[in-house]
Amino acid sequence: IVVLLLPWLWLARTVLSGEHGPGGRSLSFWETFQQGLVTFDIGYWRESWGWGWLTVGLVLLLSWGIWAAFRTNARGAALLLLVVVVPLTCLYILSRSRPIYRERYLAFSAPAYTLLIGVGLAALWGRTRAWPGRIALALCLLTLVGVNAYALARYYTAPASSKSPGWRETETC
């Protein structure tokens, strides 16, 4: 996997050398993981509330998905886990010397997060035979979809989510 990342390192040399401009951040490993997990499975969440609950719920689903994936296909699960862990670790190490963390540098690992959480939800659905458990899982899934819809709506309508201030006001004129 490191060899596969080498072409990316060449293309990212301006970012790594600090010539990419302002806006990067330097986060702890947990914050890097949390930011990626919430962003890639919920959406661009910038609300001050809900971080703790979202993180706990997604970490539980991700952990269950990893466990279920290893039970059914250990090699495939290991590959998905490496797609999540190696880029996170590399970005964390690189951001120690200069603040370069942005979610977009980990965007290619988003499918791995989603697949592992999906495997976790499918495994929970398969293990639950009674209707109260299935209703609870359905509510969990509806909550995920609802929070995702809220984050998406806020991304498109809230001025705080604007990446380039001033363009939305210019567009409405």
Image (spheres, rainbow, N blue to C red):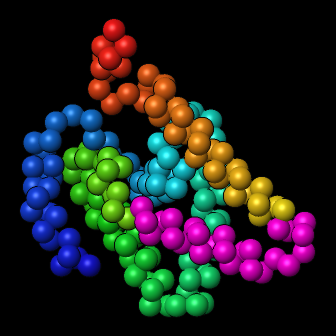
Q: Quadrant of residue 129?
A: bottom right
Q: Position of residue 164 (x, y in %)?
A: 29, 26
Q: Position of residue 83 (x, y in %)?
A: 37, 72
- The residue at the point 47 percent across, 34 percent down is 155
Q: Which residues are magenta?
A: 110-134
- The residue at the point 55 percent across, 39 percent down is 151
Residue 44 within the magenta-colored segment of the rendering: no
From the viewer's side, name the closer residue of 85 and 144: 144
From the viewer's side, name the closer residue of 75 and 85: 75
Q: Position of residue 130 (x, y in %)?
A: 90, 75
Residue 129 within the magenta-colored segment of the rendering: yes
Q: Quadrant of residue 33?
A: bottom left
> Height in image: 127 above or below 114?
below
- The residue at the point 21 percent across, 51 percent down is 97
> Height in image: 56 above or below 168?
below
- The residue at the point 66 percent across, 70 percent down is 121
Q: Is residue 128 left or right of residue 82?
A: right
Q: Is residue 98 left or right of residue 27?
A: left
Dominant SS in magenta: helix
